Structure formats: structure tokens, C-alpha cells
Image (cartoon, rainbow, N blue to C red):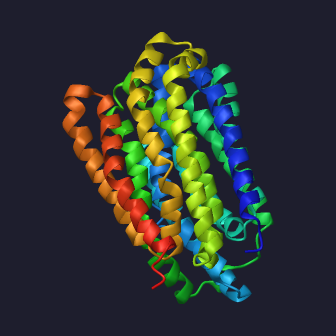
Amino acid sequence: MTYSISKAAMLNITSYLYLFVASLATTPILIKSLGLSSFSAYALSLGVLALASSIDLGLSRSVVYYLAKSNSSREKKAILASSLVFHAILGFTFATLGLFWFSKYLSLLIFLTFIVSHYQTYHEATGNFSMVNLRSFVIGTTNTIIAAYLATLGFGVDLILLSLSLATVLTIFILSSSSPRYSLRDVNRVSLKILLVYGLKLQLGKLVNAIQSQYPKLIFASTPIALTIYSLSSSLIAKAAGAVTQIAIAFFPYSITSSNSAKHRKYYAYTQISLFLLGVLATTTYSFYGESLLYWWLKDEIIVNHLHSFLLTYRYYGLLLVLTPLASTVLDSHNRSATSSLYALYALLIELSVALYALPRYGVLSIAYGSLISLLVMVPVLLYTTQKSVLPDDN
């Protein structure tokens, strides 16, 4: 590849750490300014957005995959034009559903999110992660700092969602202005077919991951305290594991073209070991300082008591979760996305079975138990399968 993986990963992690800190700083402000009921409604809106945008038929990663493999300018234009058509159709479809079931503000944001995802693919495929992270910075800042500021001024969820739409429009303008020029005349059947075939293999895994992170919000939608506890916990774990996802995103284009090299295998092994050790350190540290940090952060005894009880179990889920993004990325780069999708499906089925069985007795804690048990079963399977791909038998 023509770019540095370490530089790309550091750019991604730096951007993510900024958003992590911004989220930590603004979440208490949002809870206090919006109130528990409105904050839970805002969390639910973002959950619906995440779920809708996950049903992209796997196109985003499919576009990155084929752009990274292509050396033809004409072929790249066909891929990008086909991607725009697919993303626009999907965005319009889910925006229409959002208009009927939710609000016009969320509907607009859903459509724009699909469009910005299209424009991001070119920069991701070429390793231009400064532009990729521009999206995270602009939209992430709006979702945290600007959202908190608007809430303190007395504005509600609708205006915050509108501000996110405006930030997304700005991001689309910037990303599109630095992308190659192409038109709908560049679309052809071959590009449409290859994107769809590869993408559908990825779709199951992506949809399953979205359902896994969002279904508890739907279960607890009528219980603001439970929804808030789960939203805060999942946000903390997701943001902690998110740095790993940023490494995986940077690794994907490189892994496509260098999957059989010794350097590739060594990078994968060392990174996984380092991530696990960092996870052990974070999990152990929480035992000593976690509750005090939660009080310092949220300054609400009721929320902190519930949140701490949940995290005492859920933190081990986070420890196992950090091992999955890079492994799944390697499988995808080996054109074994169906395998990673099936892994995600089996993990979700185990989690749902345990969570729903335990729900009447343990309430929101049932989600923590289900999540942890599912990864205890499936992470060894994923790591073994990936190891066989990354380190194939030379014989």
C-alpha cells in the first residue's frame, strides 16, 4: 500500500480519543439539561439511526474492497457511481420509513448519513484517513459539544437532530470536493453486481452487530432509567473498544493486498496480544477506581449505583470485545466475510437466548450476562478461524 498503517491507525485513534473525551464531558450536561426522559428519547433516536444505517447491504466495505483492488480509473469511476446509486436508494427508503414512524428530523438525518457514508469510502480505500476522520470530527463534535450547548439553551431533541443534519451536509460537501469526478453514466451492470454480491456477504454481520447493540434500547424504551443505564454502559464499552475498531479500519485496505506476507501475520498477532493486555489493565483498574470515577463524571447517586452494578459484569464483555474487530477485518479481507457474519449471528442468538431467559429476574443486568456468555463461547471460535486464515498451513 502507498500509505502508512501506523500513521492511519494513529490518526483514527487520535480522532476517536477526542470524541471519547468530548462524549464524557458532555453526557452529564445532556442528561441534566434534557432530563432523563428526553435524554433517553435522544439515545433511542441515535439507536434507530445506527440500526437503519447498518442495513446498507454491506456496500460501504464492499466499495472499499473493490476500490483498493482496482488499478483502473474507469473501473473506479464505475464502482463509485454504482455506490452512489445504491446508497441514495437505501437512504431514501429508510428516510421514508423514518418519516412515518419517527420524525422528519430523524428521517433527514438517516438519508444524509447514507450519502456521507458513500463519499467516505473513496478516502478510506485510498488510505486518506485525515479526510475519513474529518467526518468523525465534524459530526462527532456536533453530537457532543454542540448538542450539549443547544440543550443548555433549552432546545430539545429535534433541533439537536437538525444540527446533526447540517453537520452531515457540511461533511458531504468537503468529502465530495476532494473525490474523483464521475457521473451516473459510469454505472454498469458489472460494478452493480460485484458490489452487491460481496456486500450481501457482509450485511448479515453488520446488521447483527447493530441489532446486538440496539435491541436493549427497544426493550427498555418505556423505562427511562434502564434505557439510560444501558445507553451509558454500552457507550462506554463501545468507545473503549472503538479505538480497536479504528485500527481495524486502517488495517483493512492493507490486509486486502498483503494478506499473505509475514509482516501482515506478525502485525496481526502482536496487535491482538497488545490489545488484550491493555484490556486486562483497564478491567483491573476499574475494580479500584471505577465507581469513584463514575461519581465524579455523572454526580448522580441513583444513576451511578445502577451503572456501576451493570459495569461490574459488562466490563468483562468489553475485554473480550476488543479481540473481535481486527479478527473480523482479516476474515473480510480474505473474502471470508460470510464466516465473520455467521460468527456475529451465532453470538447474537446466544446473547438473546440468555438475556431473554434472565430478563424477568435480573432486569437490565440480563443484557450484561447475555453479552458476556455469548463472547465467552464465540470469541475462541473467531480467533481460531482467523488464525487459520492469517497463518495458513504452509504444507
| Quarter placement of the N terminus | bottom right
In the depicted structure, whether residue 5 falls above or below residue 305: below
Name the foreground residue: 72 vs 247: 247
Residue at image point 57% right, 46% down? 242
In the depicted structure, whether residue 215 falls above or below residue 188: above
Query: Where residue 210 sits: x, y (%)?
Result: 43, 51
Q: Residue furthest front?
A: 395
Q: Is residue 36 left or right of residue 139?
A: left
Query: Where residue 225 sits: x, y (%)?
Result: 40, 22
Residue at image point 63% right, 20% down? 154
- Residue 149, quarter of the rendered image: top right
Can see residue 108?
no
Q: Is residue 35 left or right of residue 376?
A: right
Q: Residue furthest right?
A: 178
In the depicted structure, whether residue 124 falls above or below residue 370: below
Q: Residue furthest top?
A: 301
In the depicted structure, whether residue 225 falls above or below residue 195: above
Q: Is residue 219 left or right of residue 298?
A: left
Q: How many marks?
A: 0
Can see residue 209?
yes
Query: Where residue 224 sits: x, y (%)?
Result: 40, 24
Query: Where residue 144 sits: x, y (%)?
Result: 65, 34
Residue at image point 68% right, 40% down? 17
| Quarter placement of the C terminus | bottom left
- Residue 69, quarter of the rendered image: bottom right
